[in-house]
Amino acid sequence: MSHLKTILASLGLAVIASLPVAAQDRFPDQMVRTPAEDIPWQPLFPGVEAYALYGGLGQGVATAFIARTDPGQSMAIPHTHSDGYWGFILAGSHQHWEMSEPDQGPVLTAGSSWYQPADVPHADLCVGPEHCITLVVFEESADFIPVQ
């Protein structure tokens, strides 16, 4: 892995771990609403912003966040997670694939989903032409482990 990719991965990990939490609890005791135009996006990687709904990376708890990725940008360098997670495409044209696959898989559009098992190297790409908006849900614990 290049030195720049290592630095970017470390920065991204630090940023997502500090993303603001919309609700302190996974299931708050009062209504929480965030209109799309009021989402407090935070930088995650170049061309990628995120908004944590609950939990956080490296906190050992269930985590959900929404990511907004610029067209042509990767969600992250090839990486793995210690626990599996669900991804849901809310807007845009997105690809998600495991590094062992011969290509980047089908283009996923709004309404599409995937499940990514733990410990399997994978990557993501916003195909464009519009931003990709993705909901990511870790039921156990969220982490980010770059692969070489």
Image: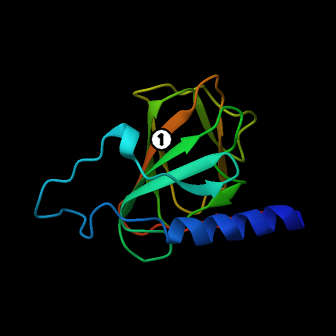
Q: Position of residue 40 (x, y in %)?
A: 43, 53
Query: Farthest residue in the top direction?
Result: 129
Position of residue 121 measured from the top left corner of the image (x, y, whole percent): 66, 55
* Residue 123 vertical position relative to residue 14 in the rendered view, above or below: above
| Percent of width and height locating residue 48 | 62, 48
Is residue 32 left or right of 64 when viewed as pictured? left
**Residue 75 in view of the camera:** yes
Q: How many marks?
A: 1
The residue depicted at 89 percent of the width and 63 percent of the height is: 2
As drawn, the residue found furthest toward the right would be 2
- In percent of the image, x 67 and y 45: which residue is there? 47
Q: In the rendering, at what x and y percent does residue 147 appear? A: 74, 63
Q: As displayed, is residue 103 above or below residue 78?
A: above
Q: Nearer the viewer, residue 18 or 147?
A: 18
Q: Which residue is mark 1?
A: 134
The type of colouring in the image is rainbow
Q: Is residue 1 among the parts visible in the rendering?
A: no
Q: Amino acid at mark 1?
A: Thr
User: Dot 1: few (<14), some (14–19), or many (≥20) neighbours within 10 Å?
Assistant: many
Residue 20 falls left or right of residue 116: left
Give whichever of 126, 82 is nearer the camera: 126
Looking at the figure, which quarter contains the C terminus? Answer: bottom right
Identify which residue, 98 or 11, lies in the foreground: 11
Q: Residue furthest bottom?
A: 59
Q: Is residue 105 above or below residue 129?
A: below
Residue 127 horizontal side relative to residue 50, left or right: right
Image quarter where the N terminus lies is bottom right
